[in-house]
Amino acid sequence: MCSENKEASSRITWEGCSVLLDINDGDRLVFARLSPAAKLKIGNKNCSLKPLIGCPFGTVFQLDSSSDGPFLSPLQPKGNVNNTEEIKDGQLNGEVRDNRSLIDNNTAQSLTGEDIEDMRRQGAKGDEIIEALIANSATFEKKTSFSQEKYRLKKQKKYAPKVLMRRPVARSICEAYFKKYPLKIGFLRVDTLSLLLSMANVSSNSDILVVDMVGGLVTGAVAERLGGTGYVCNTYLGQAPYSMDIVRIFNLSDEICKRILRCSMSDLLSQKESQQQNLLNDESQSNDQMNVLGGIEEISHSSENAISDLGAENTTLPALRACKAAKAGEKASPEVVDSWKENGFSSLIIAAPDVDTWTLVKDLLPLLSNSAPFAIYHQYLQPLATCMHNLQLGKMAIGLQISEPWLREYQVLPSRTHPCMQMSAFGGYILSGTKICSS
Amino acid sequence: MLAIDSTRKISFNRSISNGDLVIVYERHDNMKAVTVSEGSVLQNRFGVFKHSDWIGKSFGSKVFSNKGGFVYLLAPTPELWTLVLSHRTQILYIADISFVVMYLEIVTGCVVLESGTGSGSLTTSLARAVAPTGHIYTFDFHEQRAGSARDDFERTGLSSFVSVGVRDIQGEGFPQEFAGLADAVFLDLPQPWLAIPSAAKMLKHDGILCSFSPCIEQVQRSCETVQSNFSDIRTFEVLLRTYEVREEKMESSQVNGNGSNGSLPCKRRQCSGGAGVLTYPTSSVMARPCGEARGHTGYLTFARLK
Ligand SMILES: C[S@@+](CC[C@H](N)C(=O)[O-])C[C@H]1O[C@@H](n2cnc3c(N)ncnc32)[C@H](O)[C@@H]1O
């Protein structure tokens, strides 16, 4: 965030840009902000993220070492096409080798750790080390081509780790959290998030009311879709706004950040703001803001904290280093709040695992303009069922539906296509509907 | 359908005018798109509805027929449109559509190529996602279908974000003028592998391709073709299970140990079968999956240009 306009859609990184680093095919997922000083630890090596600045997203980097220490260098796309060819050939030609004569003990490899370190010091590239390991493996030749590939991959991960640099957008951020730290986003799966955005008709120039207790993921995803038009109103119960850490991971332009506003539910539900009340609220509010900003600054002192490793020991996500001031999530001005009260919000999204669904909806639904759609996420079915029942009884909404998304991934390979062995069995529930005029 | 001009967005104050597209809602499984026209009527099993009665009412209003029957008038959205559009082909539904838009990383300002247009169900959601600064170029080789789709986009107010071209995409590929300009390409074609090499030429670096196919044999061939220029190749199936919610009355029982039952919650308690077991009705709201569901739509294969 807090970047110039072009950057939100840019396909090339810049200094201060947020990136998602996928290390060794998803083994580790790290959000980082690029700066000449930022460092990332891979294995026991600390390497600078500077070479990543100015590279296209989608670039794969490999960890190499030189006399100056380890460094990341972009990998030219090649190679893995041939590997799959080989596997295919193995399959097509009818594999003759199997693993009956393989004995697993530690004597199969004649290169020692010391040998490998020696090679490194002499400037051997990761690939060369892997080739050496293969050449010195007594069992490699006897393996099936499938397990040869597995062996190669295992050694590659260890001796030539690869870092894929991805664009941090709603899809990649949601998937990364869902994989490594699902609790933080209330177990909101990417297909479920995509449905929330559709069902709430998130489109340019809309004012979307959001209750986001999933770290800011929904707020960021909505803002990304609005693209600097309309508003996301992030509302909260009580005095303290909910965390919006995840919003900072998106590369949202200033224009987009300005469209993310905060407003307490009591301010939204009060009669049109009288001048006086405003002053009072402003004071208590600005204190909150100070604290939030203060928190970010504090964290930003060390460049180490520009990096947050998902699913690592530390389960609290350190905020990404904000480059200037945090613009997303300013308090909504009384004028904007009044315009919301006058016109109504275009739609509502709730992802609030810890608040009773029906009480929230009962209060918030009247803030929506008539015919506005809404979508409510919950991990449990019962709160949504109760809410749906009450909406029906109160004739407050139509087109009510509870849906449970189901997502299955497939492995597609010649003669070996089947659903993946592992799947997420649960993506939560959504209650959707359309508000009607009260009669 | 979209609030291009922010003064035209749906609000408490915006009322239905002559010429507006409204979705007439009878029941969740019975809706219809109607363009309001002063002198017209809508006739259905509930009676005759005069459009002139609708003008000036707010979207979301309940309106009555001559016989006292009623319907609701809703503002159109891409989701509602998918439920009411005229099926000239098989179409994509909300689960696939939402996933495609998210997985193709389509946001405001993106340029997206699509083929075939079919009934324009997906196109409508693509247009919403790229508006107001992006554009969808969609192609179908069926001239009449392309024409009807164009008419629909006019009617739903999306025509400034969508261009419909008549072209055999499997035979000729996408027009050369789009080479290297597309953020995303979507294919819903019988032999997508024939269009994949062209799709690769159209995409920007790191741009994403998606192909939707109902049959696994199609997926198999597409995945083979995609190998050479793409990475991050993934195939998914997305479905939705819907739930019914009911308030049900049920008999509860309670063993009455010491004979004093003064604190039972229900007055209509009765003794059944002696032995101190009391039964009384309670009611609770319960949910269960609907019995019928779509079991398969198609496979979605995504791949990222290297
Ligand atoms: C299943 S429909 C697409 C439905 C669309 N996705 C929707 O949601 O409404 C497939 C369309 O592809 C078109 N088509 C088939 N072969 C084609 C080709 N070679 N070039 C262009 N369009 C083609 C057909 O005319 C048909 O309209």
Image: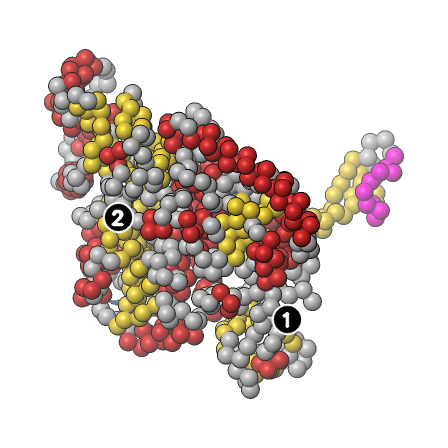
Q: Position of residue B244 (x, y in %)?
A: 58, 54
Q: Position of residue A266 (x, y in %)?
A: 66, 48
- Is the N terminus of chain A in the top left, top right, bottom left or bottom right quadrant? top left
Residue A424: image quadrant is top left
The residue lying at 43 percent from left, 75 percent from top is B155
Q: Position of residue B2 (x, y in %)?
A: 46, 66
What secondary structure predominates along the stretch shown in magenta? loop
Q: Position of residue A381 (x, y in %)?
A: 58, 46
Q: Residues within 10 Å of mark 1 (few under 14, many from 20)?
A: many
Q: Is residue B90 left or right of residue B276?
A: left
Q: Residues within 10 Å of mark 2 (few under 14, many from 20)?
A: many
Q: Determine if the C-beta at disc 1 is less than 8 A from ligand 1.
A: no
**Residue highlighted by disc 1:** B62
Q: Is residue B73 left or right of residue B159?
A: right
Res. A283 visible in picture:
yes
The boundaries of the magenta stretch are B260-269
The answer to whether marks 2 and 1 mark residues whose Cβ atoms lie closer than 8 Å is no
The chain letter for the residue carrying disc 2 is: B
Judged from the image, the quadrant occupied by ligand 1 is: bottom left
Q: Nearer the viewer, residue B107 or B209?
A: B107
Q: CA distance from mark 2 to mark 1?
A: 48 Å
Name the secondary structure under disc 1. strand
**Residue highlighted by disc 2:** B206
The residue lying at 62 percent from left, 62 percent from top is A342
Q: Is residue A264 left or right of residue B86?
A: right
- Is the C terminus of chain A in the top left, top right, bottom left or bottom right quadrant? bottom right
Res. A193 visible in picture:
no
The residue lying at 34 percent from left, 39 percent from top is A16
Name the secondary structure under disc 2. strand
Q: Is residue B186 left or right of residue B243?
A: left
